[in-house]
């Protein structure tokens, strides 16, 4: 078996055993969601652990240890084409198993997701492969190259098609309905945010997300 197939099989195993929203609720996680100037941030984190670190006045560098996963999504105003109304995932990182939960949550709340149109990591590509080939509850809609269109509609246009054409999972937009209910996770975050608003702001949550991503991808 080739290295690529080994990685794909490993990722599939992780995705099939990924924690559910109910698992995350039982673990006391919270979900922070915030739009910024060009991105929307999704962050799944341990509420009790962050509260504990704030109570002992821990160094801000330790806050990223509370994070289970982050995702940065491009806002509609920053996209150059319609892409079936889906939003582009620019970057994501997660502790083992929690990436799929974030994808499911964001796919539901954003009304569809599509891979970044310029660059996708091998690990992220395998996640999209799984959605295309193994998730019957997810609809994959083929995208069209806006610079060399094959269909008359503008709704499927995208700024760049990855190699592989229709075979590539990166050339689709993905949609799910009636999927993951994240309201309890959102409520968990809001409860903490209200109680610590005088010492921990939205900027601190954003920095926590950025630091986690940097730590996961540092070279």
Image (cartoon, rainbow, N blue to C red):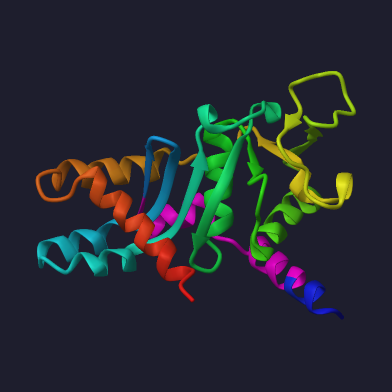
Principal secondary structure, stretch drawn in magenta: helix
Q: Hey, which quadrant is residue 178 in on the image? A: top right
Range covered by the magenta-colored residues: 8-30
Of the pair 1 and 145, the residue shown nearer to us = 145
Measuring 74% from the left and 22% from the top, which residue is drawn there?
A: 155
Q: Residue at x 78, y 49 (%)?
A: 162
Q: Is residue 95 above or below residue 45?
A: below
**Residue 24 is a magenta residue:** yes
Q: Residue furthest front?
A: 147
Residue 37, quarter of picture = top left
Residue positioned 20% across, 45% down in the render:
201
Asked whether, in this view, residue 67 is left or right of residue 192, the answer is right
Give the position of the N terminus as an image quadrant: bottom right
User: Would residue 9 be seen by someone viewing this image from the given angle?
Assistant: yes
Q: Is residue 25 left or right of residue 155?
A: left
**How far from the left and from the top, in percent, is residue 173?**
71, 38
Q: Which residue corresponds to the image point at 73% horizontal and 50% vertical from the top-left?
A: 131
State yes or no: residue 28 in magenta. Answer: yes
Considering depth in this image, is 161 or 86 the residue closer to the camera? 161
Q: Is residue 160 left or right of residue 55?
A: right
Left or right, 205 with reference to 88: left
Q: With respect to residue 99, does 135 lie above or below?
A: above
**Rendering coords of residue 123 (x, y %):** 65, 64
């Amino acid at each position: 078996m080739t290295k690529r197939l080994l990685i794909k099989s490993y990722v599939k195993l992780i995705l099939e055993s990924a924690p559910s929203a109910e698992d995350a609720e039982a673990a006391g996680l919270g979900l922070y969601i915030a739009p910024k100037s060009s991105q929307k941030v999704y962050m799944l984190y341990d509420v009790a652990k962050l509260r504990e670190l704030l109570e002992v006045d821990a160094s801000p560098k330790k806050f990223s240890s509370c994070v289970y996963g982050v995702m940065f999504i491009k806002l509609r105003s920053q996209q150059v084409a319609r892409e079936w109304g889906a939003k582009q995932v620019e970057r994501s990182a997660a502790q083992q198993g929690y990436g799929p939960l974030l994808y499911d949550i964001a796919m539901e709340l954003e009304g569809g997701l599509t891979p970044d149109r310029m660059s996708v990591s091998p690990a992220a590509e395998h996640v999209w492969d799984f959605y295309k080939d193994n998730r019957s509850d997810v609809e994959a809609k083929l995208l069209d190259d806006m610079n060399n269109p094959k269909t008359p509609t503008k709704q499927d246009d995208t700024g760049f098609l990855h190699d592989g054409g229709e075979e590539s999972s990166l050339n689709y937009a993905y949609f799910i309905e009636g999927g993951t209910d994240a309201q309890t996770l959102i409520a968990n975050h809001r409860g903490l945010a209200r109680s610590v608003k005088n010492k921990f702001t939205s900027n601190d949550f954003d920095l926590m997300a950025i630091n986690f991503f940097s730590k996961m991808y540092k070279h």
